[in-house]
Every structure is written in C-alpha cells, then in structure tokens.
Image (cartoon, rainbow, N blue to C red):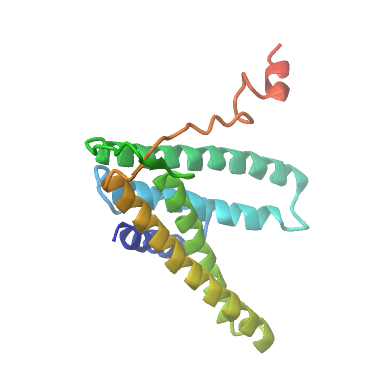
Amino acid sequence: MFSKLAYSVFEQSIQDYHQFDNVDQPINNPFPKEKIEHLLYLKNWIDTVQWHFEDIIRDPNIDPVAALTLKRRIDASNQERTDMVEYIDGYFLQKYAHIAVKNDAKINSESPAWAFDRLSILALKIYHMQEEATRAEASQDHRDKCQAKLNILLEQRTDLSTAIEELLTDIENGDKFMKVYKQMKMYNDDDLNPVLYQNKK
C-alpha cells in the first residue's frame, strides 16, 4: 500500500526532526534522490518545520521584529510546500502516463499529492496529540480529552489512507484520471501582489 509507505516515511521525518526540535536544524534526507521516498521525506520535513514556526509565532511575548522575520519564513515555507506537492504530482503523472483512460473516467477533486499532503499534516497532528495524551505534568482530564481526540485522528488516518488507495487504484484502472493545476500563488509574486509590484515603481 502506497499510503502505508508514505506514512512510514512521514513518521521517520517527524522522529528525525524531534531528535533536535530546532527549526534551523538542516535536513539529512536518508533516501536516494531518485526515490519517491526522498520527496515524501522532504515534503514532511517542510511541514514539520512549518508546524513549529506556527507554534513560535503564536508566542504572545514574541518580539515584533522577530515575528515579522518569522512571517517571511512562513511565507517562503508555504511556497516550498506547494512546490513539493507539485513535484510529487509530477511523479504520479509520469507513473500513470501509460494508462489508457476509459471514456467514462472521472476526475478527482484533488490530486494524489494533495491527498498525501493531508496525510503528512495528519501524521504531525497524531504525533503531537500523542505527546499531549501522555504528558506527565498535564492533568488527567487534559490527557483524557487528548486521547479522545487522538482516537479520532487515528480513525481519520485509516479513512484517508483507504481513500488514497482507492484513488490510486482507480487511476491505475483508468476509472479516474489526473489533471494537475499549478497553484499559482500570488502573494509571493512580485508581478501579482499589488503591494510588491507597487513598491517596484
């Protein structure tokens, strides 16, 4: 199951990050560049670092200048995350390029890579909810509530993994086809964001 492979890579990335728990820790991708696992690991590493960016910027005592610098890093991370999804979709487009699409084939509302994006974020939610459900200094009530949330997240993982496998099977069988649209984000583009292009005058 491809979703099981992807999830195991996401878990490894999360575990590797938390050995240091530092947003400035350089990535050490253990997978060869020609393998899909390399892209999956990199995708989740970006997600994991951004998760912690989002924690840091919510510190009510953060220095405003530091917050602005961090906001710029979050914007760059968002763009990198989108780029990685598109790279992963490129892998699937190539993988299924030979498939004969049936005349009555349907398009899916999201591409495989965006589904794996959701699975990557879900892996992070599960990791951190597990931490909260077992945090020794937290109250029993807190741990119980977090365990209930964790149970729902684990159910969601099963459902999402099943949906991903069904999507990949449908594509392989020609019952669905991929059509990938570039995200065309505007806020980072000097030619599309009015604030940025007005400052260029």
Q: Is residue 20 visible?
A: no
Q: Residue 87, located in which quarter of the rendered image?
A: top left
Quadrant into which the N terminus falls: bottom left
Residue at the spot x=72%, y=58% of the render? Answer: 59
Please say if 149 is above or below 170. below
- In the image, residue 65 lies at what x, y percent? 74, 42
- Vertical relation: 140 (above or below) 153: below
Quadrant of the snapshot with the C terminus: top right
Point out the residue furthest to the top here.
201
- Say above or below: 61 vs 36: below
Q: Which of 131 and 171 is in front in this view?
A: 171
Taking depth in this image into account, of 117 and 57 the one nearest to the observer is 117
| 196 sits left or right of 79 in the view | right
- From the viewer's perspective, is 77 left or right of 115? right
Residue at horizontal 71%, vertical 22%?
194
Q: In which image quadrant can residue 128 be found?
A: bottom right
Residue 175, how many percent across, how many down? 32, 45
Residue found at the very far bottom of the displayed protein: 140
Determine whether 98 is above or below 151 in the image: above
Residue under the image location 53 percent in, 37 percent down: 79
Residue 30 visible to the viewer: yes
- The image position of residue 39, as x and y in percent, is 35, 46
Where is residue 193? Give x, y as percent.
Answer: 67, 24
Residue 89 placement: quadrant: top left
Specify the farthest residue to the front: 104
Of residue 61 and residue 29, the one placed in the foreground of this image is 29
